[in-house]
Amino acid sequence: MKKIALAVSALCLSVSGVAAADDPIAVRKSIMQATAASAGLAGAMMKEELAYNPAIAKAAILTLNAGAKSYGAFFPEGSGEGDTTAAPAIWEDAAGFQAALDKYMTDTAAALDAAGKDGPADLASFQAAIGPVFSNCKSCHEKFRVQNN
Ligand code: HEC
């Protein structure tokens, strides 16, 4: 239970970080940190380090979907400079970046649909719902993120 509480408060912290920030680099990093926290929570349940809980599973999927839907708004022209790992390809291949965002939105929306009202009933259905979401992380980062960490 303590682990769950910690993970959930980490999510809330990331989200309040978003609300407080008014620079697009800080906002998009906070969204990715909330994304990573949810992915970590999902991964811990899939590895059975954390007991499977449908409500937590749904919260993780909701956070991923909310991040996917809002993320594209924080890449204004000129925000490729500074404390960021966003790759120039985001602006040079704007259509390609939009396509990656669209796929991520589609996959997280499908996971949300599959989660139903109360979250996926068991670990197997959670894995089936969220599995396709995870391929997006690597494929988008490979093209659109400078790998400096
Ligand atoms: C559509 C593209 C895209 C998808 C999908 C995506 N990311 Fe990212 N991610 C980025 C970009 C671009 C950055 C760099 C943002 C910056 O530094 O301005 C980033 C940065 C990050 C960071 C570093 C944040 C920081 O504090 O600097 C983490 C962690 C991360 N992503 C995790 C994930 C995980 C986990 C997933 C999948 C569940 C994911 N990302 C899916 C584009 C994406």
Image: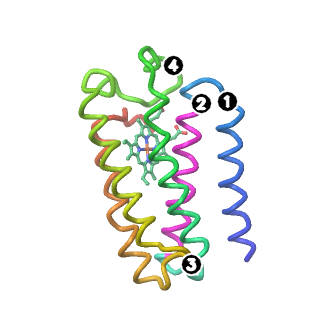
Closer to viewer: mark 2 or mark 1: 1
* CA gap, disc 2 and disc 4: 11 Å
Closer to viewer: mark 2 or mark 3: 3
Label 4: which secondary element? loop
**Residue 133 in picture, x, y percent from top left:** 37, 59
* CA gap, disc 3 and disc 1: 31 Å
Closer to viewer: mark 1 or mark 4: 1
Q: Which residue is mark 1?
A: 21
Q: Earlier in the sequence, mark 2 or mark 3?
A: 2
Mark 4 crowdedness (10 Å alpha carbons): few <14, some 14-19, many ≥20: few
* CA gap, disc 1 and disc 4: 16 Å
- Range of residues picked out in magenta: 26-45
* CA gap, disc 4 and disc 3: 40 Å
At x 71%, y 48%, the residue is: 13
Image quadrant in which the N terminus is located: bottom right
- Up/down of 44 relative to 11, above or below: below
| Nearer-the-camera pick, 149 or 120 | 120
Q: Earlier in the sequence, mark 2 or mark 1?
A: 1
Name which residue type carries label 2: Ala
- Left or right: 148 with respect to 32? left
Q: Which residue is mark 4?
A: 82
* CA gap, disc 2 and disc 1: 6 Å
Name which residue type carries label 3: Pro
At x 46%, y 76%, the residue is: 46
